[in-house]
Amino acid sequence: MARSSALVVDANPTTRLTLVGQLRAFGYLSVSQVSRIADARREIERHPFDLVVCSDSFPRGGSGQELLDDLRRSGLLPYGTVFILITDEATYLKVAEAAESSVDSYLVRPYSAGSLYDRIEQARRRKVALWDIHRTLQERRYDDAIDLCLQRFAARGPQWLSAARWGAEILLRLGRFGQAQALFQSIWDTDPQPWALLGVARCQLDSGAPAAALQTLRQLIELAPDYPDAYDVLGRAQMEMGQFEDALDSLGKALEATPMAIGRQQRLGMLAFFLGNRDKAIELLQRAAALGLDSKMFDAESLVLLSIAAFERRDEAERERHRQELHKRARANPDDARLQRFVRWIDLLAHPPQPHEAAALFADIASDAASPGFDMEAACNLLAILAALARHTALPAQDELVNRIGLRFATSKAMGELLASAAALHTPYAQRLRECEVTMVQRIEQALRRASDGEPVLALAELVAIAQDTLNARAVESAWLLLQRYRDALPNADSWRERIASLREAYGTARNRPALGDPRLRPAGGVNLGPMERLSTPSRAEEALRP
């Protein structure tokens, strides 16, 4: 520590001087101090620090959490810098946000000098032990990072459990599900941590095996019934299997275990909304907004649903308040395609288009609805808005748009019912969406019968035509399976494979799973990998690229 430099950030001069004295007593010869967030940012930009000890709240605005997030985003905080957050309270929300930002340690006042020293020393040892792995991640040498993690795990070297977990997470995020699952399983067999078995279930889910994931999750919950992340992932698995009421129950159990978790309140509220339970949804989403509207854990999707609910109740003041908040977020994130879509659609509720404007406007929306980035969340949002407009305005019926959405996303009876529930406010739309699911089943089965009758080429051509026309994931995957079965009997098999693989990448099952909330947030049971960002939602520029 004598060769290290430290920065203390605290608005209170007494506690600031106390911290400076403690750090000097630990051996730090170079200790700087500032009283404001802005000053801290400038100091960190100018000088490298080995340690930053920061208070979480400042009377003139800002917080230690916001400073850490800003430094991470800007790349101004080197991996070797230990960042310790000191707070007066340890609410679930505070701790969850700290975990999301990968703060190195979190201390609650009052604390002893010995506790502070231990946290600093533990964080420094952890960073030193994982430095080589972090460097390879930073350089995007992912295979090298995985090799280092596996070597550390096999040798039971320093921080071997953390290294193994990093390795499994890297594999999972690279889409190498089999290898990730095997590593999580090895970790579980060696040291049965609940997150390891949960990792097995996450791999099973991501690889398209929700039934196997359900079995794994039931085993985990039997062993660790108080592990809320397990119920989060269980709810996700049940949603993928169309068991929406069971998913509602599982998400409710996760929230019971952590009642102040705004992420869980939002996910439960979102599902309740699309299943038609508006009262429960509004209660949960409003509570989440009251607890953490400014939190990084708060998802703007909640504002969309609250806006729709306010429009349905004809509460213009509340609807406008949520709309203004969405616009503020969109201005701050102009390249976020998801946020920009939210704003465009909620503006429809504030200013419903006149009949002469509707055709051009909804042609643009239909084009968006055909893009790969248009997912199940977007489909349910748009259907709920169209149903509300049909119920409360003179807007011409948008049957063709509703039909296109239904044909694309009604991949099973359960998915058809979810879409119909989202549009339940306008019965003709809901009925049309149910009919879309029946139509798709009939068309796909008719094509598959051709293969059974000895005409696999015609069957494949028909399935590909259906997939290209509807963008339906079930049609895409049926074409892929048929190709695998009859590959040796098909002329131009490689050409067919290329066409279907392109459709799978853009519109296959992996892109059309029902999900709740922002996919960019850390997944339940996952860890923050620092320089290896999770796959983000497309930017507006990427959204503009249509197949």
Image: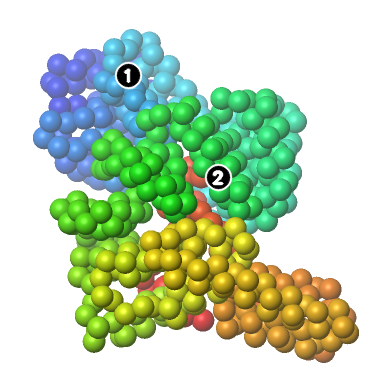
Which residue, given by chain and number where applicable, does mark 1 sit on?
A: 108
Q: What residue lies at 46% left-to-right and 33% top-to-bottom?
A: 255
Q: What residue lies at 82% left-to-right and 89% top-to-bottom?
A: 491
Closer to the chain start, of discs 2 and 1, is: 1
Q: Amino acid at mark 1?
A: Val
In the rendered image, residue 181, in percent from the top left (x then y), is placed at 70, 45
Q: Amino acid at mark 2?
A: Glu
Q: Nearer the viewer, residue 175 or 204?
A: 204
Left or right placement of residue 43 versus residue 162 in this view: left
Q: Nearer the viewer, residue 86 or 267?
A: 267
Q: Nearer the viewer, residue 5 or 359?
A: 359
Secondary element type, mark 1: strand
Q: Quadrant of the N terminus?
A: top left
Q: Are marks 2 and 1 in contact (CB under 8 Å)?
A: no
The colour scheme of the drawn protein is rainbow
Near mark 2 (Cα within 10 A), the count class, few <14, some 14-19 or many ≥20, is some
In the rendered image, residue 84, in percent from the top left (x then y), is placed at 34, 28
Left or right placement of residue 353 versus residue 4 in this view: left
Q: Across the whole image, how many numbered discs are drawn on residues?
A: 2
Q: Is residue 209 above or below residue 343?
A: above
Q: Nearer the viewer, residue 229 or 215?
A: 215
Q: What residue lies at 19% left-to-right and 21% top-to-bottom?
A: 16
Tell me which corner region of the image, top left, top right, bottom left or bottom right, holds residue 153. top right
Left or right placement of residue 533 versus residue 238 in this view: left
Tell me which corner region of the image, top left, top right, bottom left or bottom right, holds residue 113. top left
Secondary element type, mark 2: helix
In the rendered image, residue 449, in percent from the top left (x then y), is placed at 80, 79
Tell me which corner region of the image, top left, top right, bottom left or bottom right, holds residue 71. top left
Q: What residue lies at 35% left-to-right and 44% top-to-bottom?
A: 279
Which residue, given by chain and number where applicable, does mark 2 sit on?
A: 245
Kindly tell me whether residue 370 is visible in this rendering. Answer: yes
